[in-house]
Image (tube, rainbow, N blue to C red):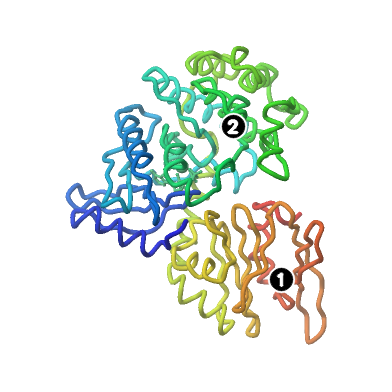
Amino acid sequence: MSLDLATLRRRLQKALGKEFTVGDLLGEGGFAAVFRVRDNSQHRDVAVKVLDLGLTPSPGLAERFVREARTSGQLEHPHIVPIYKVGGYKNEVLYIVMRCVDGRSVRQLLEREQRLSVVDAARIARQVADALGYAHGRGIVHRDVKPDNVLLDGSGHVLVTDFGIAKAAQEASASQLTTEGMVVGTPHYMSPEQATGERVDGRSDIYALGVVLYQMLAGTPPFEGESAQSVLMKQATVEPVPIRQLRGDVPAALAAVIERMLAKDPAERYQTAEELSRALVDALPGAARDGLHTGRSIAAGLVRVLVGLGALAGLGLVAFALFSGGPRLSVSAPVPDSVTQVLRRQRGLPPGDVALYVFAPRGAEDTTLLLVARRVVSVVTPHGARVYARDSVRVRYRLNLRGGLALRMILSVRRAREDTAFSRLSIRDVYEMTPRLRQLRLSP
Ligand SMILES: Nc1ncnc2c1ncn2[C@@H]1O[C@H](COP(=O)(O)OP(=O)(O)OP(=O)(O)O)[C@@H](O)[C@H]1O
Ligand SMILES: [Mg+2]
């Protein structure tokens, strides 16, 4: 994003007026930020998505964004995040006020669990299919179905967000983010017709949901690649590895549903999301229920909230860790705004990326910080940052017996030299970090 969050927050507060009090950052996407905001008149928290129009707003695109957001604002469905208000302010910011979903996204769930149980995955997919069926019936195609846009409340009830607006917003702010012809957003969930720039309809959402369902079961989406172009190529031309080869406990009937969702030709997919919803329940009757099977996710959510709260002293802690090597910092997403700002300033967190985990050891002389973001892993020091593509990095430890027992943490980076992130970690540091790095698939 071209503006820093503090400016965006200030502009949002000005735009919303006294009735609202802008609070913590809930998350950041490629082109917008989402804040928790107190609605003082209704005595409730809402989530506000702010699109930064930057220095070169395009009035036409901004208008289209508002129009599309207003259209999706008319959707009323138990599995769609309700929009309360859409507005703009002096061509500086556009914002959408919506229900605040106190839970997490399927992306966050997958970061923690990697793979879901078969019944949970089918339940989530069925609830999304119901939301899609309702919206398609009103002429609205989502166009950006992906794990980030599927939110779960505290009881695991699914709420789909960003109907039709994610792409409009991307286009409205595209001038600042990309040069023409570059692919905006993640290509992993794009249907073949979307990948090749053809007209899309509801069946494109069914394909994207097929990718999400596949990923919830296999732990990875069907197609990955070095570049956006290579993923898009595969969407259009390569057949996915059958899900049962990766996950033997998927019933054959469910595997057949997934295969049909992922058909290259839209005419071979389910033609409506209602049809898909029924097929999911036929394949696995447990999919008919809402909520999640595992209680663990909710408990884990609580732990995350506590960890988040513990990190509220963010800026001070990071400054201390960076410059004086003080107390250990160990924060999982949502990483506080103040911490994120420091990481961006040190160039460890590229624009548009989102911090998932930040760690600084307790060791007195260590002023280094490890950042794992959605796309990169960075070693951040007071002098700058060494930034690597996340999927090229693996973490290893070696004993370091010089000056007492300690561990050296090494990043092995594909096609690059090893990087010693920390040279003297205590066992306690490693104990703290290991499960989180494992969840993020950086260590064995
Ligand atoms: N209504 C909401 N309630 C609570 N948290 C939300 C809500 N909407 C979004 N969020 C959080 O904010 C994050 C950022 O959302 P945003 O839509 O800006 O980006 P994204 O969906 O992650 O990616 P993209 O920029 O490609 O759309 C989400 O991942 C989610 O964690
Ligand atoms: Mg979103």
Question: Is ligand 1 closer than 8 angstroms to the Cβ of mark 2?
Answer: no
Residue at x-position 58% and y-position 65%: 358
Q: Secondary structure at mark 1?
A: strand
Question: Is ligand 1 closer than 8 angstroms to the Cβ of mark 1?
Answer: no
Q: Secondary structure at mark 2?
A: loop
**Is 11 drawn above or below residue 410 in the view shown?**
above
- Which percent across, then down, holds residue 115? 64, 39
**Is 49 drawn above or below residue 6 in the view shown?**
above
Name which residue type carries label 1. Ala
Image-based side of 62 in relation to 256, left or right:
left
Residue at x-position 65% and y-position 19%: 263
Q: Quadrant of residue 168?
A: top left
**Is 373 drawn above or below residue 82 in the view shown?**
below
Residue at x-position 46% and y-position 66%: 310
Pointer 1 residue: 421
Please give the label number shown on residue 190: 2
Name which residue type carries label 2. Met
**Is 255 drawn above or below residue 339 in the view shown?**
above
CA separation in Å, label 1 and label 2: 36 Å
Q: Residue furthest bottom?
A: 403
Q: Quadrant of residue 235?
A: top right
Local packing at callout 2 (Cα closer than 10 Å; few below 14, some 14-19, many 20+) is: many
- Which percent across, then down, holds residue 307? 49, 61
Q: Quadrant of residue 169?
A: top left
- Which percent across, then down, holds residue 321? 56, 78
Q: Give the quarter of the figure containing the C terminus.
A: bottom right
> Which label sits in the foreground, 1 or 2?
2
